[in-house]
Protein backbone atom coordinates (compact mmCIF):
# COMPACT_ATOMS: atom_id res chain seq x y z
CA UNK A 1 0.00 0.00 0.00
CA UNK A 2 1.31 3.43 -0.99
CA UNK A 3 2.42 5.55 2.02
CA UNK A 4 1.48 8.91 0.48
CA UNK A 5 -1.53 10.26 -1.42
CA UNK A 6 0.11 12.26 -4.22
CA UNK A 7 -1.81 11.20 -7.34
CA UNK A 8 -4.57 8.70 -8.07
CA UNK A 9 -2.44 6.65 -10.45
CA UNK A 10 -0.29 5.55 -7.47
CA UNK A 11 -3.35 3.49 -6.45
CA UNK A 12 -5.19 0.61 -8.12
CA UNK A 13 -8.78 0.95 -9.27
CA UNK A 14 -9.78 -1.39 -6.42
CA UNK A 15 -8.06 0.83 -3.84
CA UNK A 16 -9.74 3.94 -5.27
CA UNK A 17 -13.13 2.17 -5.23
CA UNK A 18 -12.55 1.27 -1.58
CA UNK A 19 -11.87 4.94 -0.76
CA UNK A 20 -15.12 5.94 -2.51
CA UNK A 21 -17.06 3.29 -0.56
CA UNK A 22 -15.60 4.53 2.73
CA UNK A 23 -16.47 8.14 1.81
CA UNK A 24 -20.08 7.10 1.07
CA UNK A 25 -20.25 5.50 4.53
CA UNK A 26 -18.82 8.60 6.23
CA UNK A 27 -21.33 10.76 4.36
CA UNK A 28 -24.34 8.61 5.26
CA UNK A 29 -23.23 8.29 8.90
CA UNK A 30 -22.87 4.51 8.59
CA UNK A 31 -19.35 4.87 10.00
CA UNK A 32 -17.93 7.50 12.35
CA UNK A 33 -14.44 6.06 12.90
CA UNK A 34 -11.90 8.24 14.70
CA UNK A 35 -8.48 6.99 13.52
CA UNK A 36 -6.91 10.35 14.45
CA UNK A 37 -7.95 10.21 18.10
CA UNK A 38 -5.21 11.93 20.08
CA UNK A 39 -3.24 12.74 16.91
CA UNK A 40 -2.55 15.84 14.81
CA UNK A 41 -2.24 16.45 11.07
CA UNK A 42 -0.21 19.35 9.63
CA UNK A 43 -1.76 21.25 6.71
CA UNK A 44 0.84 23.35 4.89
CA UNK A 45 -0.58 26.00 2.55
CA UNK A 46 1.80 27.84 0.23
CA UNK A 47 -1.32 29.15 -1.60
CA UNK A 48 -4.85 30.36 -0.74
CA UNK A 49 -7.78 27.98 -0.28
CA UNK A 50 -11.37 27.82 0.91
CA UNK A 51 -12.58 24.26 0.26
CA UNK A 52 -9.36 22.35 0.81
CA UNK A 53 -8.43 24.14 3.99
CA UNK A 54 -11.90 24.12 5.58
CA UNK A 55 -12.74 20.54 4.58
CA UNK A 56 -9.37 19.21 5.75
CA UNK A 57 -9.59 21.07 9.05
CA UNK A 58 -13.15 19.85 9.68
CA UNK A 59 -12.31 16.34 8.42
CA UNK A 60 -9.34 15.98 10.76
CA UNK A 61 -11.55 17.15 13.65
CA UNK A 62 -14.32 14.69 12.73
CA UNK A 63 -11.73 11.87 12.65
CA UNK A 64 -10.86 12.73 16.25
CA UNK A 65 -7.70 14.71 15.50
CA UNK A 66 -6.28 18.21 15.57
CA UNK A 67 -5.25 20.22 12.46
CA UNK A 68 -2.10 22.36 12.58
CA UNK A 69 -2.31 24.90 9.75
CA UNK A 70 0.91 26.50 8.55
CA UNK A 71 1.40 29.12 5.84
CA UNK A 72 5.08 29.39 4.84
CA UNK A 73 6.05 33.02 4.55
CA UNK A 74 2.98 33.98 6.63
CA UNK A 75 2.43 32.06 9.85
CA UNK A 76 5.65 30.06 9.45
CA UNK A 77 9.10 30.73 8.00
CA UNK A 78 9.78 31.07 4.29
CA UNK A 79 10.95 27.69 2.93
CA UNK A 80 13.75 26.55 0.64
CA UNK A 81 13.27 23.21 -1.12
CA UNK A 82 16.33 22.97 -3.41
CA UNK A 83 19.20 20.81 -2.28
CA UNK A 84 22.74 22.13 -1.93
CA UNK A 85 21.87 25.83 -2.20
CA UNK A 86 23.56 28.61 -0.24
CA UNK A 87 20.60 30.04 1.66
CA UNK A 88 21.68 33.68 1.64
CA UNK A 89 18.54 35.15 0.01
CA UNK A 90 14.93 35.34 1.26
CA UNK A 91 14.36 31.74 2.45
CA UNK A 92 14.77 31.20 6.20
CA UNK A 93 14.29 27.45 6.69
CA UNK A 94 14.97 24.37 4.57
CA UNK A 95 12.34 21.69 4.00
CA UNK A 96 14.92 19.19 5.26
CA UNK A 97 14.41 20.54 8.77
CA UNK A 98 10.80 21.78 8.38
CA UNK A 99 9.43 18.37 7.39
CA UNK A 100 11.49 16.28 9.80
CA UNK A 101 10.66 18.54 12.75
CA UNK A 102 6.96 18.73 11.86
CA UNK A 103 6.53 15.00 11.60
CA UNK A 104 7.81 14.55 15.15
CA UNK A 105 4.51 16.24 16.14
CA UNK A 106 1.98 14.94 13.59
CA UNK A 107 0.63 11.73 12.03
CA UNK A 108 0.52 13.07 8.45
CA UNK A 109 1.35 16.19 6.44
CA UNK A 110 -0.93 17.76 3.82
CA UNK A 111 0.63 20.25 1.43
CA UNK A 112 -0.71 22.71 -1.13
CA UNK A 113 1.86 24.08 -3.55
CA UNK A 114 0.65 25.43 -6.91
CA UNK A 115 2.66 25.75 -10.10
CA UNK A 116 4.10 29.25 -10.59
CA UNK A 117 3.66 28.94 -14.39
CA UNK A 118 7.25 30.07 -14.91
CA UNK A 119 9.21 26.99 -16.05
CA UNK A 120 7.21 24.11 -17.52
CA UNK A 121 10.05 21.57 -17.66
CA UNK A 122 10.84 22.15 -13.99
CA UNK A 123 7.34 22.51 -12.59
CA UNK A 124 6.02 19.34 -14.26
CA UNK A 125 8.51 17.45 -12.05
CA UNK A 126 6.78 18.66 -8.84
CA UNK A 127 9.92 20.06 -7.16
CA UNK A 128 8.30 21.16 -3.88
CA UNK A 129 5.93 18.22 -3.39
CA UNK A 130 8.81 15.85 -4.20
CA UNK A 131 10.92 17.47 -1.50
CA UNK A 132 8.16 16.84 1.06
CA UNK A 133 8.01 13.23 -0.14
CA UNK A 134 11.81 12.90 0.09
CA UNK A 135 12.11 14.15 3.67
CA UNK A 136 8.91 12.71 5.19
CA UNK A 137 8.67 9.33 6.89
CA UNK A 138 4.98 9.98 7.69
CA UNK A 139 2.24 10.08 4.99
CA UNK A 140 2.16 13.15 2.71
CA UNK A 141 -1.21 14.17 1.23
CA UNK A 142 -1.27 16.30 -1.91
CA UNK A 143 -3.71 19.17 -1.39
CA UNK A 144 -2.99 20.44 -4.93
CA UNK A 145 0.44 20.55 -6.43
CA UNK A 146 1.81 21.78 -9.76
CA UNK A 147 0.49 18.73 -11.62
CA UNK A 148 -2.16 16.98 -9.49
CA UNK A 149 -5.16 17.61 -7.23
CA UNK A 150 -6.12 14.05 -6.31
CA UNK A 151 -8.41 14.92 -3.38
CA UNK A 152 -10.46 17.05 -5.80
CA UNK A 153 -10.61 14.38 -8.49
CA UNK A 154 -11.67 11.71 -5.99
CA UNK A 155 -14.47 14.04 -4.77
CA UNK A 156 -15.38 14.49 -8.46
CA UNK A 157 -15.58 10.71 -8.98
CA UNK A 158 -17.71 10.36 -5.85
CA UNK A 159 -20.05 13.07 -7.14
CA UNK A 160 -20.44 11.37 -10.54
CA UNK A 161 -21.07 8.08 -8.72
CA UNK A 162 -23.80 9.71 -6.59
CA UNK A 163 -25.59 11.14 -9.61
CA UNK A 164 -25.29 8.17 -11.98
CA UNK A 165 -24.39 5.06 -9.96
CA UNK A 166 -21.56 2.76 -11.04
CA UNK A 167 -22.23 2.98 -14.79
CA UNK A 168 -19.52 4.50 -16.94
CA UNK A 169 -20.52 7.85 -18.37
CA UNK A 170 -19.50 10.17 -21.20
CA UNK A 171 -17.60 12.94 -19.45
CA UNK A 172 -16.33 16.16 -20.95
CA UNK A 173 -13.45 18.24 -19.61
CA UNK A 174 -13.91 21.59 -21.32
CA UNK A 175 -11.25 24.32 -21.28
CA UNK A 176 -12.71 27.76 -20.59
CA UNK A 177 -11.42 31.26 -21.16
CA UNK A 178 -10.22 33.02 -17.98
CA UNK A 179 -8.52 36.41 -17.54
CA UNK A 180 -5.31 34.84 -16.27
CA UNK A 181 -3.51 31.56 -16.97
CA UNK A 182 -4.15 28.95 -14.25
CA UNK A 183 -2.30 25.75 -13.25
CA UNK A 184 -3.15 22.37 -14.78
CA UNK A 185 -3.51 20.26 -11.64
CA UNK A 186 -7.31 20.01 -11.74
CA UNK A 187 -7.66 19.11 -15.45
CA UNK A 188 -4.80 16.64 -15.11
CA UNK A 189 -6.25 14.91 -12.07
CA UNK A 190 -9.85 14.93 -13.31
CA UNK A 191 -8.80 13.35 -16.61
CA UNK A 192 -6.61 10.75 -14.94
CA UNK A 193 -9.27 9.74 -12.42
CA UNK A 194 -12.03 9.67 -15.05
CA UNK A 195 -9.85 7.28 -17.08
CA UNK A 196 -9.08 5.14 -14.02
CA UNK A 197 -12.80 4.85 -13.27
CA UNK A 198 -13.44 3.70 -16.85
CA UNK A 199 -15.44 6.67 -18.14
CA UNK A 200 -15.45 7.73 -21.78
CA UNK A 201 -13.50 10.97 -21.53
CA UNK A 202 -13.55 13.79 -24.05
CA UNK A 203 -11.10 16.67 -23.50
CA UNK A 204 -11.96 19.87 -25.38
CA UNK A 205 -9.54 22.76 -25.67
CA UNK A 206 -8.30 25.17 -28.32
CA UNK A 207 -5.09 24.10 -30.05
CA UNK A 208 -2.18 25.25 -27.88
CA UNK A 209 -3.73 24.12 -24.56
CA UNK A 210 -2.66 20.47 -24.71
CA UNK A 211 -2.07 18.67 -21.41
CA UNK A 212 1.32 17.12 -20.66
CA UNK A 213 2.28 14.48 -23.29
CA UNK A 214 3.41 11.87 -20.75
CA UNK A 215 0.27 12.34 -18.68
CA UNK A 216 -1.95 12.07 -21.77
CA UNK A 217 -0.30 8.75 -22.62
CA UNK A 218 -1.00 7.56 -19.07
CA UNK A 219 -4.63 8.73 -19.30
CA UNK A 220 -5.04 6.86 -22.58
CA UNK A 221 -3.54 3.67 -21.08
CA UNK A 222 -5.72 3.92 -17.99
CA UNK A 223 -8.82 4.45 -20.13
CA UNK A 224 -8.02 1.34 -22.20
CA UNK A 225 -7.24 -0.79 -19.12
CA UNK A 226 -10.45 0.23 -17.38
CA UNK A 227 -12.87 -0.06 -20.29
CA UNK A 228 -13.13 3.62 -21.13
CA UNK A 229 -11.80 5.83 -23.91
CA UNK A 230 -10.06 9.14 -24.57
CA UNK A 231 -11.00 11.62 -27.29
CA UNK A 232 -9.51 15.09 -27.78
CA UNK A 233 -11.32 17.80 -29.74
CA UNK A 234 -10.22 21.34 -30.50
CA UNK A 235 -13.58 22.83 -31.51
CA UNK A 236 -16.04 23.85 -28.83
CA UNK A 237 -18.98 23.09 -31.13
CA UNK A 238 -17.84 19.42 -31.23
CA UNK A 239 -17.46 19.16 -27.47
CA UNK A 240 -20.92 18.81 -25.92
CA UNK A 241 -22.68 16.28 -28.17
CA UNK A 242 -23.79 13.10 -26.34
CA UNK A 243 -22.17 14.09 -23.01
CA UNK A 244 -23.47 13.20 -19.51
CA UNK A 245 -21.02 15.18 -17.38
CA UNK A 246 -19.70 18.65 -18.26
CA UNK A 247 -16.60 19.61 -16.25
CA UNK A 248 -15.42 23.14 -16.96
CA UNK A 249 -11.92 24.34 -16.10
CA UNK A 250 -9.46 26.88 -17.40
CA UNK A 251 -5.72 26.29 -17.57
CA UNK A 252 -2.64 27.97 -18.95
CA UNK A 253 -0.71 26.82 -22.01
CA UNK A 254 2.57 25.06 -21.25
CA UNK A 255 3.94 26.86 -24.34
CA UNK A 256 3.74 30.18 -22.50
CA UNK A 257 5.07 29.33 -19.02
CA UNK A 258 7.42 32.19 -18.16
CA UNK A 259 5.61 34.66 -20.46
CA UNK A 260 2.02 34.74 -19.32
CA UNK A 261 1.26 37.93 -21.25
CA UNK A 262 1.69 35.90 -24.45
CA UNK A 263 -0.86 33.40 -23.20
CA UNK A 264 -3.34 36.24 -22.63
CA UNK A 265 -2.83 37.52 -26.18
CA UNK A 266 -3.11 33.99 -27.60
CA UNK A 267 -6.33 33.18 -25.75
CA UNK A 268 -8.11 36.47 -26.45
CA UNK A 269 -10.01 35.13 -29.53
CA UNK A 270 -11.40 32.22 -27.45
CA UNK A 271 -13.25 34.39 -24.92
CA UNK A 272 -16.60 34.50 -26.71
CA UNK A 273 -16.98 30.78 -27.48
CA UNK A 274 -15.17 28.95 -24.65
CA UNK A 275 -17.73 29.51 -21.89
CA UNK A 276 -20.28 26.97 -20.67
CA UNK A 277 -23.70 28.41 -21.42
CA UNK A 278 -27.23 27.11 -22.01
CA UNK A 279 -26.76 26.88 -25.78
CA UNK A 280 -23.99 24.30 -25.19
CA UNK A 281 -25.65 22.44 -22.32
CA UNK A 282 -28.75 21.72 -24.45
CA UNK A 283 -26.51 19.83 -26.90
CA UNK A 284 -25.51 17.41 -24.10
CA UNK A 285 -27.59 14.51 -22.66
CA UNK A 286 -29.32 16.38 -19.80
CA UNK A 287 -25.79 16.57 -18.38
CA UNK A 288 -24.73 17.59 -14.91
CA UNK A 289 -22.43 20.63 -14.64
CA UNK A 290 -19.27 20.35 -12.52
CA UNK A 291 -16.48 22.72 -11.51
CA UNK A 292 -13.96 22.42 -8.68
CA UNK A 293 -14.56 26.06 -7.55
CA UNK A 294 -13.69 28.86 -7.13
CA UNK A 295 -15.32 29.84 -10.42
CA UNK A 296 -15.71 33.18 -12.14
CA UNK A 297 -19.40 33.51 -13.02
CA UNK A 298 -20.23 34.61 -16.57
CA UNK A 299 -16.59 34.00 -17.54
CA UNK A 300 -16.22 30.21 -17.14
CA UNK A 301 -19.95 29.45 -16.84
CA UNK A 302 -23.10 31.54 -17.09
CA UNK A 303 -25.32 32.21 -14.08
CA UNK A 304 -28.13 30.29 -15.76
CA UNK A 305 -26.03 27.09 -15.94
CA UNK A 306 -24.37 27.21 -12.52
CA UNK A 307 -27.69 28.12 -10.87
CA UNK A 308 -29.64 25.41 -12.74
CA UNK A 309 -30.78 22.12 -11.18
CA UNK A 310 -28.14 20.35 -13.33
CA UNK A 311 -25.32 22.10 -11.47
CA UNK A 312 -23.74 19.89 -8.78
CA UNK A 313 -20.90 22.20 -7.76
CA UNK A 314 -22.00 22.50 -4.11
CA UNK A 315 -22.37 18.73 -3.68
CA UNK A 316 -18.96 18.36 -5.33
CA UNK A 317 -17.43 20.76 -2.79
CA UNK A 318 -19.17 18.96 0.11
CA UNK A 319 -17.74 15.67 -1.10
CA UNK A 320 -14.22 16.98 -0.51
CA UNK A 321 -14.90 16.51 3.22
CA UNK A 322 -16.09 12.90 2.96
CA UNK A 323 -13.47 11.73 0.48
CA UNK A 324 -10.59 13.28 2.43
CA UNK A 325 -11.77 11.56 5.62
CA UNK A 326 -11.72 8.29 3.65
CA UNK A 327 -8.24 9.02 2.25
CA UNK A 328 -6.80 9.83 5.68
CA UNK A 329 -8.42 6.72 7.14
CA UNK A 330 -6.87 4.54 4.42
CA UNK A 331 -3.40 6.08 4.79
CA UNK A 332 -3.42 5.60 8.55
CA UNK A 333 -4.91 2.11 8.53
N1 LIG B 1 -11.33 23.21 -5.32
C1 LIG B 1 -10.42 23.66 -4.41
O1 LIG B 1 -9.36 23.05 -4.21
O2 LIG B 1 -10.82 24.80 -3.78
P1 LIG B 1 -9.87 25.71 -2.87
O3 LIG B 1 -8.79 26.26 -3.79
O4 LIG B 1 -10.77 26.78 -2.32
O5 LIG B 1 -9.27 24.85 -1.81
Image: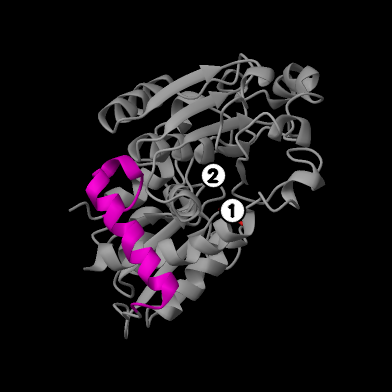
Residue 129 drawn at (x, y percent): 40, 46
SS class, disc 2: loop
- Looking at the image, how many numbered discs can be counted on the residues? 2
- Residue occupying the far front of the picture: 285
161 vs 186: above or below: below
Say which label, 1 or 2, has the lower sequence index.
1
Residue 170's tag is none
Locate residue 173 relative to residue 126 in the image: left or right.
Answer: right
* Residue ID at (38%, 80%): 65
Q: Which secondary structure is most common in the magenta stretch?
A: helix
Specify whether residue 6 is painted magenta: yes
The residues tagged by marks 1 and 2 sit, at their Cα atoms, a distance apart of 7 Å
* Residue ID at (61%, 53%): 312
User: Range of the magenta residues?
Assistant: 4-31
* Image quadrant, ligand 1: bottom right
Residue 47's tag is 1
What colour scheme was applied to this rendering of the protein?
one colour
Q: Which residue is mark 2?
A: 114
Q: From the image, which quarter does the C terminus lie in? A: bottom left
Crowd class of label 2 (few under 14; some 14 to 19; many from 20; radius 10 Å): many
- Residue behind label 1 places its C-beta within 8 angstroms of ligand 1: yes
Q: Do the residues under discs 1 and 2 have CB atoms within 8 angstroms?
A: yes
* Residue ID at (35%, 77%): 30
The answer to which of 325 and 170 lies nearer the viewer is 170
Locate residue 128 relative to residue 163 in the image: left or right.
Answer: left
Can residue 297 be seen here?
no
Amino acid sequence: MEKNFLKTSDFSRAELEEIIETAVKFKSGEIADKPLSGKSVALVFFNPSLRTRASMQVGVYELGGNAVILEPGGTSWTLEHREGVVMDSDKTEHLAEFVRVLERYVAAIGVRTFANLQDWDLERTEPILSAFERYAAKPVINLESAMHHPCQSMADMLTIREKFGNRKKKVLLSWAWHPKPLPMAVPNSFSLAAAQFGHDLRIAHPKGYELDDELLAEIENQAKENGGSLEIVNRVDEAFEDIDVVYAKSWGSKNFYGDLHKDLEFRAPFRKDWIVDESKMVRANDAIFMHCLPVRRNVIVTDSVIDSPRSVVIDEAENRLHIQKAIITKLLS
